[in-house]
Image: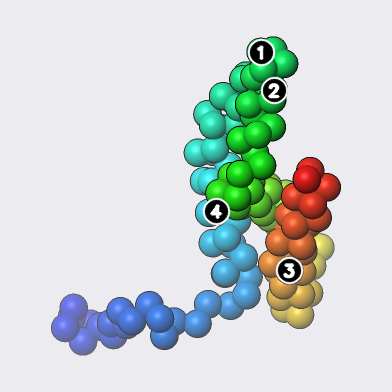
Amino acid sequence: MSDSTRPVFLNLFQIRLPVAGIMSIAHRAAGILLFLAIPFVVALLSLALSDQKGFDQVQALLQQPLMQVGLLLLLWALAHHFLAGIRYLLIDMHLGVQAPCYRQSARAVLVAAPVLALLLLWGLS
Protein backbone atom coordinates (compact mmCIF):
# COMPACT_ATOMS: atom_id res chain seq x y z
CA MET A 1 0.00 0.00 0.00
CA SER A 2 1.51 3.29 -1.03
CA ASP A 3 1.18 6.54 0.84
CA SER A 4 -1.23 7.97 -1.74
CA THR A 5 -3.85 5.25 -1.16
CA ARG A 6 -3.69 5.36 2.61
CA PRO A 7 -6.85 6.83 4.11
CA VAL A 8 -6.37 10.21 5.73
CA PHE A 9 -8.87 11.68 8.18
CA LEU A 10 -7.74 15.09 9.39
CA ASN A 11 -10.97 16.69 10.56
CA LEU A 12 -10.52 16.41 14.33
CA PHE A 13 -14.04 17.75 14.98
CA GLN A 14 -15.59 14.71 13.29
CA ILE A 15 -13.58 12.09 15.17
CA ARG A 16 -15.74 10.53 17.89
CA LEU A 17 -13.69 9.21 20.76
CA PRO A 18 -15.20 6.66 23.11
CA VAL A 19 -15.96 7.95 26.61
CA ALA A 20 -12.95 6.07 27.98
CA GLY A 21 -10.73 7.92 25.49
CA ILE A 22 -12.10 11.29 26.56
CA MET A 23 -11.52 10.35 30.20
CA SER A 24 -7.98 9.24 29.42
CA ILE A 25 -7.15 12.54 27.71
CA ALA A 26 -8.67 14.46 30.64
CA HIS A 27 -6.56 12.35 33.03
CA ARG A 28 -3.39 13.35 31.20
CA ALA A 29 -4.44 17.01 31.05
CA ALA A 30 -5.20 16.96 34.78
CA GLY A 31 -1.77 15.48 35.51
CA ILE A 32 -0.02 18.15 33.44
CA LEU A 33 -2.04 20.90 35.13
CA LEU A 34 -1.22 19.56 38.60
CA PHE A 35 2.47 19.35 37.72
CA LEU A 36 2.56 22.89 36.34
CA ALA A 37 0.73 24.23 39.41
CA ILE A 38 3.33 22.91 41.88
CA PRO A 39 5.53 26.07 41.94
CA PHE A 40 2.48 28.33 42.34
CA VAL A 41 1.00 26.23 45.15
CA VAL A 42 4.37 25.99 46.93
CA ALA A 43 4.82 29.78 46.70
CA LEU A 44 1.33 30.37 48.14
CA LEU A 45 1.97 27.87 50.92
CA SER A 46 5.31 29.46 51.72
CA LEU A 47 3.73 32.91 51.89
CA ALA A 48 0.84 31.65 54.02
CA LEU A 49 3.21 29.99 56.49
CA SER A 50 5.61 32.94 56.73
CA ASP A 51 3.59 35.04 59.19
CA GLN A 52 0.10 36.38 59.89
CA LYS A 53 0.44 39.11 57.25
CA GLY A 54 1.39 36.52 54.60
CA PHE A 55 -1.52 34.31 55.60
CA ASP A 56 -3.91 37.26 55.29
CA GLN A 57 -2.46 38.09 51.84
CA VAL A 58 -2.99 34.54 50.61
CA GLN A 59 -6.49 34.46 52.05
CA ALA A 60 -7.37 37.74 50.30
CA LEU A 61 -5.79 36.53 47.06
CA LEU A 62 -7.80 33.30 47.08
CA GLN A 63 -11.05 35.26 47.49
CA GLN A 64 -10.63 37.03 44.14
CA PRO A 65 -12.94 35.71 41.37
CA LEU A 66 -10.13 34.83 38.96
CA MET A 67 -8.32 32.91 41.69
CA GLN A 68 -11.57 31.12 42.56
CA VAL A 69 -11.78 29.92 38.96
CA GLY A 70 -8.15 28.79 39.07
CA LEU A 71 -8.74 27.04 42.37
CA LEU A 72 -11.80 25.29 40.93
CA LEU A 73 -9.72 24.15 37.96
CA LEU A 74 -6.99 22.81 40.25
CA LEU A 75 -9.54 21.06 42.45
CA TRP A 76 -11.12 19.49 39.35
CA ALA A 77 -7.68 18.32 38.20
CA LEU A 78 -6.95 16.84 41.60
CA ALA A 79 -10.34 15.11 41.86
CA HIS A 80 -10.23 13.82 38.28
CA HIS A 81 -6.67 12.57 38.53
CA PHE A 82 -7.44 10.84 41.84
CA LEU A 83 -10.66 9.16 40.65
CA ALA A 84 -9.23 8.17 37.28
CA GLY A 85 -6.14 6.78 39.02
CA ILE A 86 -8.34 4.56 41.17
CA ARG A 87 -10.20 3.45 38.04
CA TYR A 88 -6.93 2.57 36.32
CA LEU A 89 -5.73 0.65 39.38
CA LEU A 90 -8.93 -1.40 39.36
CA ILE A 91 -8.52 -2.06 35.63
CA ASP A 92 -4.93 -3.18 36.28
CA MET A 93 -6.37 -5.70 38.77
CA HIS A 94 -8.71 -6.87 35.96
CA LEU A 95 -11.80 -5.40 37.63
CA GLY A 96 -14.20 -3.58 35.33
CA VAL A 97 -12.47 -4.52 32.10
CA GLN A 98 -15.63 -5.61 30.27
CA ALA A 99 -17.28 -3.20 27.83
CA PRO A 100 -20.29 -1.91 29.76
CA CYS A 101 -18.39 -1.62 33.03
CA TYR A 102 -15.40 0.35 31.71
CA ARG A 103 -17.71 2.79 29.92
CA GLN A 104 -19.78 3.30 33.07
CA SER A 105 -16.71 3.85 35.22
CA ALA A 106 -15.33 6.38 32.72
CA ARG A 107 -18.65 8.26 32.76
CA ALA A 108 -18.71 8.12 36.55
CA VAL A 109 -15.25 9.73 36.74
CA LEU A 110 -16.21 12.43 34.22
CA VAL A 111 -19.32 13.30 36.25
CA ALA A 112 -17.97 12.84 39.78
CA ALA A 113 -14.77 14.89 39.39
CA PRO A 114 -16.44 18.27 38.68
CA VAL A 115 -19.07 17.61 41.36
CA LEU A 116 -16.35 16.78 43.89
CA ALA A 117 -14.37 19.88 42.85
CA LEU A 118 -17.42 22.11 43.38
CA LEU A 119 -18.07 20.54 46.78
CA LEU A 120 -14.44 21.07 47.79
CA LEU A 121 -14.51 24.70 46.62
CA TRP A 122 -17.76 25.28 48.51
CA GLY A 123 -16.19 23.75 51.61
CA LEU A 124 -13.14 26.01 51.32
CA SER A 125 -15.22 29.18 50.96
Circles 4 and 1: CB atoms closer than 8 Å: no
Q: Secondary structure at mark 2?
A: helix
Query: x, y percentage for residue 4?
Result: 16, 83
Q: Is residue 82 visible from the viewing direction of this image?
A: yes
Q: Is residue 65 left or right of residue 96?
A: left
Q: Which mark is residue 55?
A: 2
Location of mark 1 (residue): 50
* First along the sequence among labels 2 and 3: 2
Numbered disc in front, either 2 or 4? 2
Query: x, y percentage for residue 123?
Result: 83, 47
Query: Looking at the picture, does residue 64 appear above or below residue 97?
Result: above
Quadrant into which the C terminus falls: top right
Query: x, y percentage for residue 112?
Result: 77, 64
Q: Nearer the viewer, residue 90 or 20?
A: 20
Quadrant into which the N terminus falls: bottom left
Circles 1 and 2: CB atoms closer than 8 Å: yes
- Image quadrant where residue 62 sits: top right
Numbered disc in front, either 4 or 1? 1
Numbered disc in front, either 2 or 3? 2
Q: Which mark is residue 111?
A: 3
Q: Is residue 106 left or right of residue 32?
A: right
Location of mark 4 (residue): 28
Q: Secondary structure at mark 3?
A: helix
